[in-house]
Image (cartoon, rainbow, N blue to C red):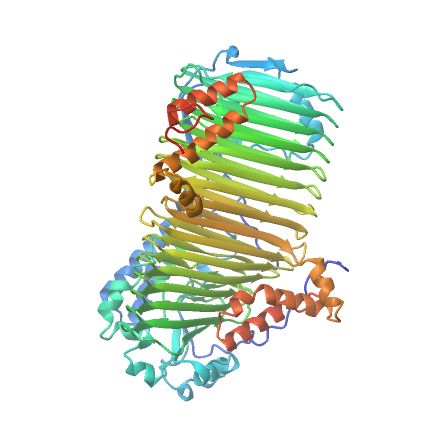
Amino acid sequence: MAAEKQQVTEVDRSLYDFVKSEEGYERLDAGLTPDIVREISAKKDEPQWMLDLRLKSLEIYHSLPIPDWGPSIEGLDMDHIVTYVKPPTEQKSDWESVPDDIKDTFERLGIPQAERAYLAGVGAQYDSELVYHNIQESASKQGVVYSGIEEALHGPYEELIHDHFMQLITPQDHKFAALHGAVWSGGSFVYVPKGVHMEFPLQSYFRLNAKGAGQFEHTLIIVEDGADLHFIEGCSAPKYNVANLHAGAVELFVGKNAHMRYSTIENWSKNMYNLNTKRAIVDDGGTIEWVSGSFGSHVGYLYPMSILNGADSTCEFTGVTFSGATQNLDTGCKVVLNAPRTSARIDTKGISKAGGIQTFRSSVLVTEKAEDSDVYVSCANLMLDDESRSDTIPAMDVRAKNCNVGHEASIGRIGDDMMFYLMSRGISEDEASTMIVNGFANPVSKELPLEYAVEMNNLIKLEMEGMEGAIG
Amino acid sequence: MTAATETHTAWRPQMTPAEVAALAVNEGARTIMVNRPPAITWHKLKINEVAASLPALPAAARTAVEVASGDAVWGAEAEPFDAALAEADPEGHFESGMGAEAEAWLSAHTAERVLVDVAAGEEPDPVLVHLDAEDGAASVCALDIIVREGARATVYAQADAPAGGTGVAGFAIRALVGEGAHLSLVVLQTLDDGYTYLENTAALLGAGAHAAFTQTELGARRSLVGTAFALDGDESSVDIDTHYLGHGENDLDFNYVIRQRGRATKSNLDANGSLADASSKILRGTIDFIHGCKGAVGHERDTVLLANDKVRNKTMPVLLCDEDDVQGDHGASIGHVNPEQLGYLEARGLSESQVEALFVGAQFDYAAVHAFDERAAAGVNRLAQRVIGREAGAQLEGEA
């Protein structure tokens, strides 16, 4: 097998990599000060408790160290990050009212089309603010609430939000959770009442257009007992030659015997520092499913956490991370089994190429309460050339006797036998390697709605362009 | 932002060189940080390293270390090994599993140094080294092993405390395995609960060299075990076979670092253990495929039986991979007696607690079967009597 190694050429990302003018946009000063935090809060006319939380979070942010166990974030200078950029529009509920250049952005990304075809509701955030939010009437009639979180703060759900906001992800968790608490802006609030099964998914899409800015949206979802929701999250940004930052937060509350699936296709530009935090807590008999595809960002720290707090609750995590040139993606998940007969299944795939660094990191905690529980973690990593790096760093802490914890991981490259088989049937080397990588990522794409699976496969194809000759 | 940023592969610096140098002077109680893996993770997990608080103790008398048989130099200097190391390792790859702070502390408390130096092509009789911990002292044996080109060596070492007492005992093992050479190293630890045990191993293998390392850790209130193998030579290989038992409130803390630099190198780390009573264990195992180790293969596995609700087990099996043409895998299996085994044994009249005792006792039985001399067997049996109330290898009372 020809095995000449080479660096991959820069791929065409024009589908995502386009910039719109910022004329008429409001930008706060770069950096982090109490005055900036107060200004953000004042613009949103927030209740006092939220301002207090922001200011306390800022204090905590300054007191916590930068993580020293993951990829370097030396290139991220918070003194040069603009934490709030407001587009010149208010939130709309019909696309025709959205300013043309913003509407054009989301049309190019296929969001309005997706809403018409198969979504029960869509939220679209542009820089720091939601510009569009809408839910189908049929879902509203079932009592489902899907709105901007700031909008919900001023309505009948303020108390509910007060009781849940940053309760799962506290500002003390880590430095960037504290940062989020201080400067969060935008994001969605979803409430699915008891017993309501959403037939179609809801989707939020986050677009960061502003150069040198941060996006800090907060997603809060409450799925009541016996209810069912599939929520899809997408994101993208044009590439700049300065750092951008994403430090969002997702808090999911899954009730008794409820079911929730949270799917993400992350495709930030490759100047992005993606320091996102996601967490779910699950009550008796409930289920949380994470489906995660990570393709973008310069540096990523992403570990969705599931706290199985109710007896018989379950978690499934299915993820793929594709790390290419200039990328250092540290991804994985955390699971806490904290009740009897809980179970978790984690299945991840990592692909690295063209000098990219990919790390799978996980933690599994089985507490004394988790009798008769079981966890299985599977992690497979594929290296597409000898310029790249792939690490696997799992940790397991088991404090219960009657449980079973299994972990398997493997690292290797595409086998010559597979390449030979495909190429001997007339398939080019480039196509063969793309097919193999697609097959490798199939456990993730098969869990996504068809349209998103197609998008993910296209992203893989995009990343594989220029790999000809690089697979050995 | 043209290149991917580097992954941190080490936590904050350990002690400064001056602070480490101070450790090499035996004075006062010390707290040292040991067993840091090459790549760390969330600090909240408390798995990245461990603190060892060591009391002020005099070094034991030289007679705590005995070469029971075989051709070895008792009362050796460090120089012969240092000279061989300088020649074999010009790039400074040699490292220990516990780290610099432990190296310095052990050096300051060494009772005696034993040198096993096997000439090229030779295969002498096995060397047996016994370390009998001295009450109220730090009993450390420095064990230097040089297996020169094409030679074969077998070294057995036991840390025991037949007279009971309290203190610290340990081995500081350095091994060089030359081109085409073979080392079989067996270490057995049967200390009483009054002791803290430190076992720090550093080994470097040349082309085509092979090392088989068997560790059995059965006793000591606290066991801190660090093991590092540098597979520098092409086609060098190591098999590490570890057996451990936690009982009472004992803590076990392991750190394995296998650096595969040579082409077609092979490593296999297989740890098996049982945790009973309120014991706890941390095992970190890192296989590091370093750029250029094409064709390398590495496996690691930790299989743990949890035999009590109060035990606590942490496992961190790490693969670091900077080379595409390798095969690496790791696994961990942590849990209770599996339902099939439990059902089978319960059907034959054993209660669940008896089944648990059977599995715990099996660690002693295994050690007894593999005891390399009478003193080793005696140490295993003394500990078995105290922990499971019977001699190793004997039938459980009432067992079907």
Image quadrant in which the C terminus of chain B is located = top left
Residue A412: x %, y % from top left? 63, 54
* Residue at image point 52% right, 53% down: A71
Quadrant, the N terminus of chain B = bottom right
The vertical placement of B277 against B116, above or below, is below
User: On the image, which quarter does residue A161 sit in?
Assistant: bottom left
**Percent position (x, y) of residue A47?**
24, 68
Q: Nearer the viewer, residue A193 or B162?
A: B162
Q: Relative to B338, does residue B88 appear above or below in the rendering?
A: above
Residue A471 visible: no
Which residue ends up furthest to the bottom in the rendered image? A96
- Residue A426 located left or right of residue A244: right
**Residue B347 picture location, percent across and down:** 39, 42
Image coords of residue B356 (percent x, y):
39, 37
Q: Nearer the viewer, residue A144 or A109?
A: A144
Task: Identify the residue at horizontal 47%, vertical 57% (top origin).
Answer: A346
Above or below, comparing residue A28 to residue B141 in the picture:
below
In this rendering, the answer to whether A331 lies above or below B227 is: below
Q: Residue at x 34, y 59 (%)?
A: A313
Residue B332 makes an appearance in the image: yes
